[in-house]
Image (cartoon, rainbow, N blue to C red):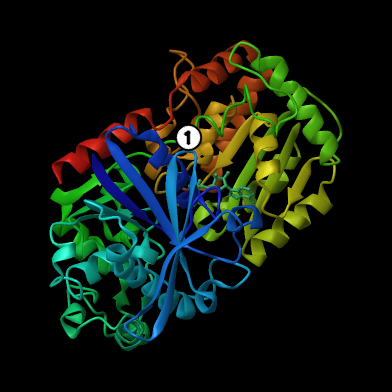
Amino acid sequence: MKKILFVASECVPFVKTGGLADVCGSLPKAFDKKEYDIRVIIPNYHAIKEEYRNQMETVYYFQMDNRIYVGIKTLTLDGIQYYFVDNEMYFGGLVPYYDMFQDLERFAYFSKAVLSALPLIGFRPDIIHCHDWQSALVPVYLNTVFQGDPFFRGIRTVFTIHNIRFQGTWDVGHIQWVSGLPWECFEPGRLVSPYQDTSIPKNSWNCSMMRGGLVYSDYITTVSNSYAEEIKTPNFSDGLDDILKWRSERLWGIINGIDYEEWNPAKDKKIYKNYTIRTEKNGKKANKVNLQKELNLPENPDVLTLGIISRLTDQKGLDLVNIIMDELCSREINLIVLGTGSENYENMFRYYQSKYPNKVAARIMYSDDLAHKIYAGVDALLVPSAFEPCGLTQLISLRYGTVPIVHAVGGLRDTVEPYNEYEETGTGFSFNEYTAWGLMDRINHASWLYYDRPESWQKLVKRGMEKDWSWANSSKIYEDLYSRM
Ligand code: ADP
């Protein structure tokens, strides 16, 4: 039996702000329980629903370093045991993340608490699998502060990059202070970039927790093959290409899957009408009309309806959308937007909704319920991201018979096969050059197919639905990786 501990800052169904939570919630379930004992540890945020918090039991509590409280709670759900690091001061707020200055301290604490707790809770993992910068100090602590303790001898680590844009970056002084790591960790090439650009005054912000994870873990993975290549280049690496090139033998790209139970149009209780690959035509129309009704758009099953479900940040290509909005709204098209994020994008979509009330519906909020309804009710989903490590929304779309229109980058390139009208192949539309024109051109192509070649559109939809983006394939690759370690 292989014992593996996932360490992450979010996990479905407890707390979610993005795709990381989906992955940590669904991947552990994909392994054979007879061979793998996979457990997950996250902070015990106050933001976790009462329903779960009430079920938690305390396993142990202690003072870490004789000065700071650590509680470990647990609960088992769908056969997976979850642990929660409890500390009111750090995790008692209403949201999982604060500002970076505070988060550095909170997640340094979290990473150290995870390791400190292990000898006390009766679980010694063979492998610790860390996700994103919030858990990046785990391999660093393990190989420095905890190195002398026989309990930890032989524990291996994997670090998965879900998004290299967020690294937990600050100056050496602050990170040293919050982590209490020994000075050797801050030599250039460890947590500190060896290439310091002294011409930028910001150069004191040269220390990143994620870099530590990349340097000190045994293996590194990221969430698609294309992204694994891209982050070895300066354009995509946010300053970490040196270390990723250096460790490229230990860097694997493994594409994410989605939870095929949660995302299943045949059984989804959140959508208006269930459908399968055989009944998608009428099923999607029924969902579309109900969605239009709910969002105060004119009810019309035949209008090409586009969707966007996204964090509203500059990663997601919304500047391109802004440029084409007037052009788009001069056509027979609806656009339904669900998202929260930067104020400028939130206001941008509010503005277009008021300018085109019969065509645009923007819901500036986070709603899992509405997300399900949109995946089921729209014809195509726009994902024009400037960069995209994997992207889950296009995978969910394919599952729901919704055609993805994407920028061919990162995981979007690896999962959406461009439509070829001569050979009748492909599952979506993709543009190579990151321009508004590129996006508009693909929407035009999609629109032509939808209105003028409805049978080909239907085939395209079905080809997408036939693809398997569950964890079945990728979990095998993780098994291969774990067994090598
Ligand atoms: P990222 O992790 O960069 O945010 P992904 O495409 O990997 O992007 O994952 C986004 C996940 O979050 C998807 O499951 C998507 O459905 C969900 N999501 C994004 N915004 C919202 C929202 N406003 N309401 C509900 N779900 C959302």
Beta carbon at label 1 within 8 Å of ligand 1: no
Let me know if residue 242 appears in the view: no
Rendered location of residue 327, percent (x, y): 70, 43
Q: Circle 1 is placed at which residue position?
A: 430
Let me know if residue 413 appears in the view: yes
Q: Mark 1 is on which residue type?
A: Ser
Q: Residue at x 74, y 50 (%)?
A: 363
Residue 267 versus residue 363: which sits nearer the camera?
267
Q: Is residue 332 above or below residue 423?
A: below
Rendered location of residue 271, percent (x, y): 71, 31
Residue 60 versus residue 400: which sits nearer the camera?
60
Looking at the image, residue 358 sits to the left or right of residue 192; the answer is right
Q: How many marks?
A: 1
Q: Residue at x 48, y 79 (%)?
A: 102
Question: Circle 1 — which element?
Answer: strand
Image quadrant of residue 235?
A: bottom left
Looking at the image, residue 321 sits to the left or right of residue 412; the answer is right
Figure quadrant of the N terminus:
top left
Residue 182 versus residue 366: which sits nearer the camera?
182
Rendered location of residue 296, percent (x, y): 86, 41
Q: Is residue 77 above or below residue 285?
A: below
Looking at the image, residue 322 sits to the left or right of residue 72; the answer is right
Residue 212 versus residue 86: which sits nearer the camera?
86
Looking at the image, residue 362 sits to the left or right of residue 444; the answer is right
Q: Is residue 286 above or below residue 16?
A: above
Rendered location of residue 174, percent (x, y): 36, 86
Q: Residue at x 24, y 74 (%)?
A: 191
Q: Determine crowd level at label 1: few under 14, some 14-19, many 20+ residues with C-alpha closer than 10 A.
A: many
